[in-house]
């Protein structure tokens, strides 16, 4: 009797929805508020609500039955570890008590894809999981098509434009961006002070950064003090900055290595000028790409990394690497966003198993663990609550791929609560938002053929950085080789997906 009553209620609700839709269609162009219905909702909002709540009873369909999901990440393989993921999942289950989520241990990064493919053979895949390389698993039909879920998710509109379209293959979305792991910039403030140089603000420019590096080198060059250590930023972020200066629309679309969504632009004038600046910096000595152990002993009497021993004024480094050294530094330092408002970084991506029986619920878990506002706010509250208790491998300073703006109290609940400021003020600088929003992102996990083109490019850039070759003589060959590598990889994936 109870089931019959429930069925009648659902049927009645469906009829009411149908009548409302008919009424809306009948009203035609007479709707107030620029096409909104009398309730103040636009047609897209109505469509989105009906997508998740087909019976129109006010409760999303994925919340109306008992569901079990499994979640997997490569960041640890100890099921007993207390991590931000396990804590977040506990909170997800409190918010949605009809869903039970289990952590599934698949393996660590190096064995991730191999183990996923093995689980596919036994149809034992996790329902929601991180994806190491889209190109490596796309042809195995592991990933669900998330296009409809994403397109009917209003929160997806808040994802940064620079990463929103990543993870799409031939018109279908298979993964979503989760977090950006930035290439932070470090400034040795003690070294600057010794040279009577004022520390820059977080809105510093590329020219300002170079001026500081040169000034430190000129003041202390006789003791082998280094202005800038490392060169990747000159062919990763700087081409985008230079492109934006001459063509803001085209430049804003560039990711790392001048990738514009279709090709890598190694032959663009902006790229040529960026690498030319690198050649000048190397020749003048204030930029050092790296030092071998023999040179380190000659200069400093130790093989210790010169960045951490206080010999370097400025350097750029992945946040997940620097975290292992921050506590040991014996000088005052701070974290900065990238100069001229462009911070590079890696994005992680995640998807839903094609074998999952409850894909709508799985998408909600995926969203909670990545870009969803409620999940993000909960994540940072948990960081604040548990702090050092968390398993450190799962805390690699991930930054959001979204900005939901400020609430009614004038607070940006996500970006005003970045939990890393206890390590350095710069981690929470407002400039970080814009620098990541417009950043040069390394999209090798999402873009098919990225690795092939990048590896080809690096074979040639080595000749410039280490052997003194000139980019102007090499770039036509580099562009041709990168285009070919990209084309061949995509053709290989296309042939496998088409089988």
Image (cartoon, rainbow, N blue to C red):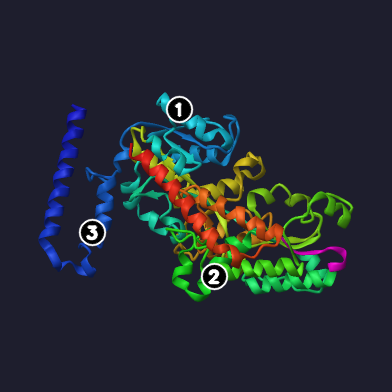
Tell me residue 440's x, y (percent): 53, 60
> In the rendered structure, are the residues bearing label 1 and label 2 in contact, judged by CB atoms less than 8 Å apart?
no
Identify the secondary structure beneath mark 3. Answer: helix
In the image, taking residue 434 as reference, residue 65 lies left or right, namely: left
Q: Which mark is residue 43?
A: 3
Quick check: can you spot residue 142? no
In the image, taking residue 329 as reference, residue 146 lies left or right, namely: left
Question: Where is the N terminus found, in terms of image quarters?
Answer: top left
Residue bearing mark 2? 270
Instruction: Mark 3 vs mark 2: give the one in front.
Output: 2
Tell me residue 449's x, y (percent): 47, 49
Disc with the residue nearer the chain's start (1 vs 2):
1
Residue bearing mark 1? 119
Q: Which residues are magenta?
A: 221-231
> In the rendered structure, are the residues bearing label 3 and label 1 in contact, judged by CB atoms less than 8 Å apart?
no
Could you tell me which residue is drawn at 57 percent across and 50 percent down? 455
- Mark 3 and mark 1: Cα distance apart in space: 42 Å
């Amino acid at each position: 009797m109870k089931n019959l009553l429930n069925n009648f209620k659902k049927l009645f609700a469906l009829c009411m929805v149908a009548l409302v839709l008919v009424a809306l269609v009948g009203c035609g162009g007479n709707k107030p508020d620029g096409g909104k219905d009398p309730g103040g909702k636009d047609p897209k909002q109505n469509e989105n609500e009906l997508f998740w709540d087909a019976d129109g009873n006010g409760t999303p369909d994925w919340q109306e039955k008992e569901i079990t999901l499994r979640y997997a990440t490569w960041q640890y393989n100890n099921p007993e570890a207390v991590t931000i993921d396990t804590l977040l999942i506990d909170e997800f289950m409190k918010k949605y008590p009809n869903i039970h989520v289990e952590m599934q241990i698949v393996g660590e990064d190096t064995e991730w894809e191999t183990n996923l493919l093995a689980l596919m053979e036994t149809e034992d895949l996790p329902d929601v999981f991180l994806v190491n390389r889209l190109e490596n698993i796309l042809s195995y039909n592991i990933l669900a098509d998330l296009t409809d879920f994403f397109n009917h998710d209003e929160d997806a509109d808040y994802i940064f434009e620079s990463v929103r379209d990543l993870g799409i293959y031939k018109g279908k979305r298979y993964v979503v961006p989760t977090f950006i792991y930035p290439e932070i910039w470090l400034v040795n403030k003690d070294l600057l002070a010794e040279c009577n140089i004022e520390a820059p603000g977080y809105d510093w420019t590329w020219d300002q950064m170079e001026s500081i590096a040169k000034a430190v080198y000129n003041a202390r060059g006789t003791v082998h003090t280094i202005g800038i250590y490392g060169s990747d930023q000159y062919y990763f972020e700087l081409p985008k900055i230079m492109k934006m200066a001459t063509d803001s629309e085209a430049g804003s679309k560039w990711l790392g290595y001048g990738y514009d969504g279709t090709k890598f632009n190694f032959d663009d004038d902006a790229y040529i000028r960026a690498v030319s600046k690198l050649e000048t910096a190397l020749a003048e000595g204030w930029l050092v790409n790296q030092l071998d152990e023999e040179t380190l002993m000659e200069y400093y009497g130790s093989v210790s990394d010169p960045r951490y021993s206080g010999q370097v004024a400025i350097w750029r480094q992945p946040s997940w690497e620097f975290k292992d050294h921050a506590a040991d530094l014996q000088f005052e330092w701070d974290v900065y966003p990238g100069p001229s408002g462009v911070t590079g970084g890696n994005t992680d991506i995640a998807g839903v198993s094609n074998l999952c029986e409850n894909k709508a619920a799985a998408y909600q878990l995926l969203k909670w663990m990545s870009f969803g506002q409620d999940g993000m706010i909960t994540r940072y509250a948990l960081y604040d609550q548990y702090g050092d208790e968390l398993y450190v491998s799962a805390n690699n300073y991930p930054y959001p791929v979204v900005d939901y703006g400020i609430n009614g109290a004038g607070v940006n609940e996500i970006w005003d609560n970045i939990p890393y400021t206890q390590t350095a003020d710069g981690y929470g600088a407002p400039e970080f938002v814009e620098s990541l929003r417009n950043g040069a992102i390394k999209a090798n996990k999402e873009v098919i053929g990225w690795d092939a083109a990048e590896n080809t490019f690096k074979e040639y850039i080595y000749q410039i950085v280490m052997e003194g070759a000139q980019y102007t003589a090499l770039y036509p060959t580099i562009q041709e080789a990168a285009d070919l590598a990209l084309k061949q990889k995509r053709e290989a994936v296309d042939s496998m997906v088409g089988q």
